Image (cartoon, rainbow, N blue to C red):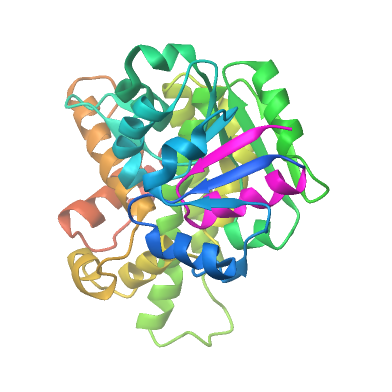
Amino acid sequence: MLKIAVLGAGVMATALTFPAVENGNDVRLIGTHLDDEIIDSIQATREHPVLELKVDERVKAYHFADAAEAVEGADVIMSGVNSFGVDWAGEQLAKLAKPGQTILCVTKGMQADEDGTLHILPDVLKKHMGDLANEVHWAAIVGPSIAGELAVHRNTCVVFCGEEQKVLDRLAAAYRTDYYHVWTSTDFIGHEVGACMKNIFAFGGGFAAGMLEKAGQTDARYVMYDYTAALFGEGARELKQMVSFMGGDAEVATGLGGVGDMFVTTMGGRNVRAGTYVGAGVPFSEIRNVKMKGITLEGVAAIGVVGEAIGKMTERGVIAETDFPLVRALYEIVAHNAPLDLPWEKFFGGER
């Protein structure tokens, strides 16, 4: 049995309490300073107001004011805040974590330096933790996992990745159930990069639906599966290229942490909905400021970070101008309000 403290009470972090507590682990769910209403609801009725499911009675729910009590004696601290809060999470872990604990990350994305150098989010957490970062163990969960499906026990396959195999084996044993299937990998960088890149390409998963809507052809017999499949294929190619560029194993792109995760992310959600508006001809500034104002779009945020970084690294000669044509096109849409006009001739290495 492990003592697991989960920082963040969002849908994915909460969903992960289900297999953990069902395996007999001592699980504490800690809301951030933005999660007070969620924790109030769980404490009063066990209902998570966003998941719309009851959290297991054995999961202890804490407000952030009681975080120090919740992490006391924990074997594992899960960082479950979204990518917009990763710097805040790093600052809190610097105060809460103790040597010997394992930090388990579920947040996906990357950050970039001024010159475009990219960093996976566990490295961002490490930066805030100083010397303590070298005294804890690091791991992350990647793969196709929709929070609601996991919480209601749909079969879900994921990869626990990290730096030490013995730590991964211990974590996998703590979470693995007859519906939550866990593989392990020590390619930490490769899987974290893949998890970021799949969010980027999910945005394009909505383009075809929007284009059909704009054309008044939502009930057409022949739709645009060819179009979406081509985007998916180019996305998979660029995901693989970025994994290799960042120092990971290119084979990650062919598995759960690559195309597997990208598939489920393109099936729906907020980023796909934003892409549908783009396909319908709505300028992205209107999507951001009107149609989806106040809605967190982590995939779009990743496009902003990675797209800008690719431009800077191209200027430095680190990346060729022909590399990542789809990411560049998506970046023009979200950063410069460009209309949807994909450079098909540049995809798949360029038309021969």
x 20%, y 59%: residue: 338
Question: In this view of the protein, which residue sits in the foreground, 100 or 208?
Answer: 100
The verdict on residue 349 being magenta is no
> Is residue 348 something one can see in this rendering?
no
Residue occupying image coordinates x 63% and y 51%? 59
Q: Quadrant of the C terminus?
A: top left
- x and y percentages locating residue 156 in the rendered image: 71, 51
Q: Please give the range of residues in magenta.
A: 1-23
- Location of residue 111 (image quadrant): top left
Q: Name the residue at 19% across, 20% down.
A: 316
Q: Quadrant of residue 96?
A: top left
Q: Residue at x 39, y 47 (%)?
A: 64
**Residue 327 relative to residue 217: left or right:** left
Front-most of residues 101 and 282: 101
In-image side of 132 versus 58 (left or right): left
State whether residue 130 is above or below residue 105: above
